[in-house]
Image (tube, rainbow, N blue to C red):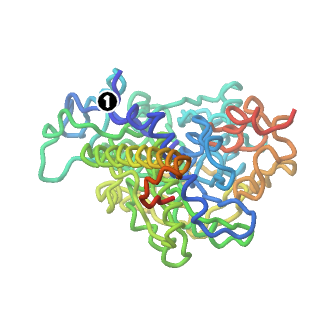
Amino acid sequence: MAMKYVDEFRDPDKARTLVAEIRGLIPRIPRAGERPLQIMEVCGGHTHAIFRYGIQQMLPEEVEFVHGPGCPVCVLPMGRVDDCVAIAERPEVIFTTFGDAMRVPGSQKSLLKAKAEGADVRMVYSPLDALAIARKNPGREVVFFGLGFETTMPSTAMTLIQARRAGQTNFSLFCNHITIIPTIRAILDSADLQLDGFIGPGHVSMVIGTRAYDFIARDYHKPITVAGFEPLDVLHSLWMVLRQLAEGRCEVENQYGRIVPEAGNARALAAVDEVYELRPFFEWRGLGSIDHSGVRIRDAYAAFDAERKFSVPNVVVADPKACQCGEVLKGVIKPHECKVFGTACTPEMPLGSLMVSSEGACAAYYSYGRRERVPA
Amino acid sequence: MCLGIPGRIVEVTDPETMTAMVEVGGVRRPTNICFIVADDTPPSAYLGEWVLVHVGFAMSLIDAAEAERTLAMLTELGEIQAEIDAMQQSNEANFSLRGTDHGHEVCR
């Protein structure tokens, strides 16, 4: 079945051309000693694409992708999963969630385990599906697990706007949305990182626009190219970042113009602003607390806030000791260098959240890259 | 989580809630189009448009002109690369034929 601008961006001839172009740029880029150029792809969707299409293996060894924290499931702290389970286990609750959050381990259990033990946990494709479940079950409390960066935020916001308009009192949202800009800033401020540039998140940017990244070029003097998710998009964007480095430029460039307008989506941003406000701080798995990196539901929508409707334990739980998700997230170690990678921690029995989602660096490494990367 | 999928608006089912049928890879699914419909335009004006769908919402109109521009740029890059390859091969040939005095400057 034809899909607009999918096959066109998977053309192997064009990929070969881009790889040749990238090779050609390398000698023109000043480097500190033998250290490879490190380009961070912020978004987990890009991490997935890089592994799925074997993009790293196509590249000269002087260029390396560093996998960023842009997988919302992967950075969810254990305590929040425990809160989900506590809500889901209430007898009156139907707990609805995106599929990829089902297997994230909490300190005691995942949502999947809670479901197996009898909690009414249902996977949905859209928050609107959760709202429809609330309409059909007036005697139950339906909670949706709101998760994701700015890509997903407008959808949950609009769902709450519709719920309020319809007077749907048995529907609420457990809000765990996070914002991209403070996250990138925290990465840039972290001392143990030596990044040369960024592949910017494509679908976050279709909401927030590209100007939001100006500070990366202006204040931190790093190039960034907002990228699409097909293999040619990723290669093309990498080439654009390297070309900036070769020419001594630091700018915000947009490779994904077919989807990302410079100004973002004003209607989507208005919905987000109507429903959400910044939290003073939000706790991330592996990265610790980042100021203003999460949002909560505004008072006007308090009746739809699961955190106010149900008392949640809200306990901060430390990550398992053996798990090195934090170091992988910051790019300090590679997934296979983690002590428990592929042994105590596998996609079937994940210990750390990076092994859970297909967008997590460890799961991607395990599924696609393991044979090439791990000596027998 | 942040992945989206291109689909085409084939029917506006409820203009009130901005619900439309969007065909994605041959499958039709109700999709909310409120984020892509401009204030002064009826939803029906978007029939046939390609959109990027994410968790039940159309999040962006796919800009065909921009897509073509990107593809054209990549094609051009390929042509330039082919040109450079040809040039290099020709240079190598010329180097080996140095003695026969095809005296033009080669740029390497």
Percent across and percent down for residue B98 are 53, 52
Residue at the image point whose x is 63% and y is 38% from the top? A357
As rendered, which of B34 and B6 lies closer to the eye? B6
Label 1 crowding class (10 Å Cα cut-off): few <14, some 14-19, many 20+?
some
Rendering coords of residue B80 (x, y %): 39, 49
Residue plotted at (33% across, 61% down): A262
Disc 1: host chain: B
Q: Is residue B32 above or below residue A83?
A: above
Q: Amino acid at mark 1?
A: Pro
Q: Is residue A363 above or below residue A78?
A: above
Q: According to the image, label 1 marks what residue?
A: B30
Which image quarter: residue A342? top right
Residue A305 in view (yes/no): yes
Task: Tell me how many marks there are.
Answer: 1
Q: Is residue A303 visible?
A: no
Residue B36 appears left or right of A286: left
Nearest to the observer: residue A176 or residue A327:
A327
Horizontal and vertical percent for residue A216? Answer: 51, 71
Asked if residue A250 is positioned above or below residue A263 in the image, the reply reads below
Quarter of the figure with the N terminus of chain A: top left
> B44 or A279: which is nearer to us?
B44
Provide the secondary structure element on which disc 1 rests: strand
Is residue A329 rendered to the left or right of residue A96? right
Q: Quadrant of residue B11?
A: top left
* Residue at the front extreme, as displayed: B100
At which x and y percent is residue A237? Answer: 48, 53
Residue sitting at x 61%, y 58% = A39
Quarter of the C terminus of chain A within the rendering:
top right
